[in-house]
Amino acid sequence: MPDLDAAPAAWLGRRPLWLAALIVFALGAVAALGQAPWSLWPLSVLAFAGLFACHLSAGSVRRAGWIGLAGGAGYFAVALSWIVEPFLIDAPRHGWMAPFALILVSVGFALFWAGAQMAARAVQGNALVWAAMLTLSEALRGWLFTGFPWAQPGHGWIFTPMLHWAAIGGALPLTFAMLIAGAGLWHLVLGRRMLGASALAAIAALYAAGPFVAQAPEMPEDAPIVRLVQPNVPQNQKWDREWMAFHFDRQMAFTAADAPPDLIVWPETALPVMLNQADAVLAQVAGAARGTPVVLGVQRADDARYYNSLIVLDGQGRRAALYDKHHLVPFGEYMPMGNFLARFGIRGLAQQGGYGYSAGPGPQVIDMGALGRALPLICYEGVFARDVAEAPGRADFLLLITNDAWFGQVSGPYQHLAQARLRSAEQGLPMIRAANTGVSAMIDAAGRITAQIPLGEAGYLDAPLPPPGTPTLYSRSGDLPALFLLLLAVIVPAGLHRRKIARAARQ
């Protein structure tokens, strides 16, 4: 039987490179619509089918690289469009940087896809190699230069039953499944129908079996009640002295409302003063809490160093625990080569008074008394599965405080929330998530949201803390099994291709 997808691939291959790049850029942009808040994963599958066809059309390694670059640029330009938001908070000062930031981020991350496409083309890779190479490039993007594993193609599955497979293999197999679904669809419609049907049937089976892979324990009747405080402070007002008292009083009112819960959680950098000068303010917080422990975000100074921190006040208002954020945002909370760039007035966007943050010593687990052991995470740290995996011991729940006002009101906060759900599903642990502007949420051990405060609303929510699940396979093994299988999916076909070339040369 002839290869029916050869004709469309040949047609694409004959187009001028600039036209092929425009087509691929558009396909990449559509593929990004699988990300939150759109969550249109069927469109992602369709778009990746087209991207796979474009890969087949590349007649050379060089053209494959340009196709990968164009597709990645379109994908990341849409998926990470929120990256312009921090520059618009102080638009007169930083607004001019916004388009350059989006272009640099989109093209920079697209280079990973370009390299993957070139490598897949070099070994005459089939759908398996293509999907594996792109997935490996996403793994590399999540590690290199401190990593940025945001908006991976597999994140499009988070709002589907496929999320539960993260308990087995983490995020990387979800990306591989998304890409295989696209390649399988292309083969089914235009090419090797048996191969395409088999691939799509496998994905459909995984989708259907997802709810049976990992299930959260039932909520006990005596589950602790946690109050999430969401003040909804716009970032341009956060450190404005004319507004600081108003927003602090709002958090105090939410803290003192109704019957006291078992725990109260404020978001990242919630205190309007440095911890070193906060004794009087903390006494007010403890008074409003009426004997309830309070978790809150605060900045603190230690000699010449500044930290983005989380503290726990016990029922008597004493500092029971302190955690310093250790995985900082490059160009936001600190500047690579900061001393040199500071000479030109270039400083991180989130820095206060021109001073960057210092990194804390690393992950830690803190004792929260009757509620169990918590693994604290501050904002950006919730994006990294390895920051959770490196904790010294298993916690009973994840505790994430964040200020998503930096991300705007369109896509960034929802994508950050989606990744919080992924962390819970990977570890089989519930999460308490308190966000300044939202979405504050309670998430169970299967990654499902059990209660939330919508984005852009001020308020508080009392919700029961779900119990932890049993340790997942991923919590024991991490990404190593997935990486091994992905490498195997590349190495075996590459070896067979080399043998084929050597045999042809001997003839």
Image (tube, rainbow, N blue to C red):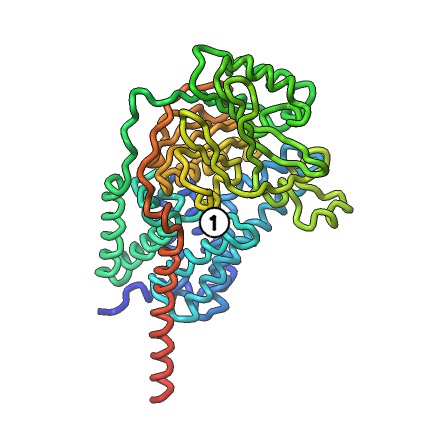
Q: Tell how many labels.
A: 1
Q: Position of residue 226 (x, y in %)?
A: 42, 22
- Determine which residue is flagged by label 1: 75
| Residue 359 relative to residue 190: left or right | right
The quarter of the displayed image where residue 500 is located = bottom left
Residue farthest toward the top in the current orientation of the protein: 258
Q: Position of residue 470 (x, y in %)?
A: 31, 39
Q: Position of residue 174 (x, y in %)?
A: 36, 49
Regarding residue 401, the answer to whether it shows in the image is: yes
> Dot 1: within a 10 Å radius of its alpha carbon, few (fewer than 14), some, or many (20 or more) residues?
many
Q: In the rendered structure, which amino acid carries the disc numbered 1?
A: Tyr
Q: Is residue 56 above or below residue 458?
A: below
* Residue at image coords 56%, 32%: 322
* Residue at image coords 24%, 61%: 195
Q: Is residue 476 above or below residue 357?
A: below
* Residue at image coords 41%, 66%: 120
Residue farthest toward the bottom in the current orientation of the protein: 507
The quarter of the displayed image where residue 219 is located = top left
Between 320 and 131, the residue placed more toward the observer is 320
Between 234 and 421, the residue placed more toward the observer is 421
Q: Position of residue 407 (x, y in %)?
A: 54, 35
Quadrant occupied by the N terminus: bottom left
Between 439 and 357, the residue placed more toward the observer is 357
Between 20 and 403, the residue placed more toward the observer is 403
Quadrant occupied by the C terminus: bottom left
Q: Is residue 325 above or below residue 115?
A: above
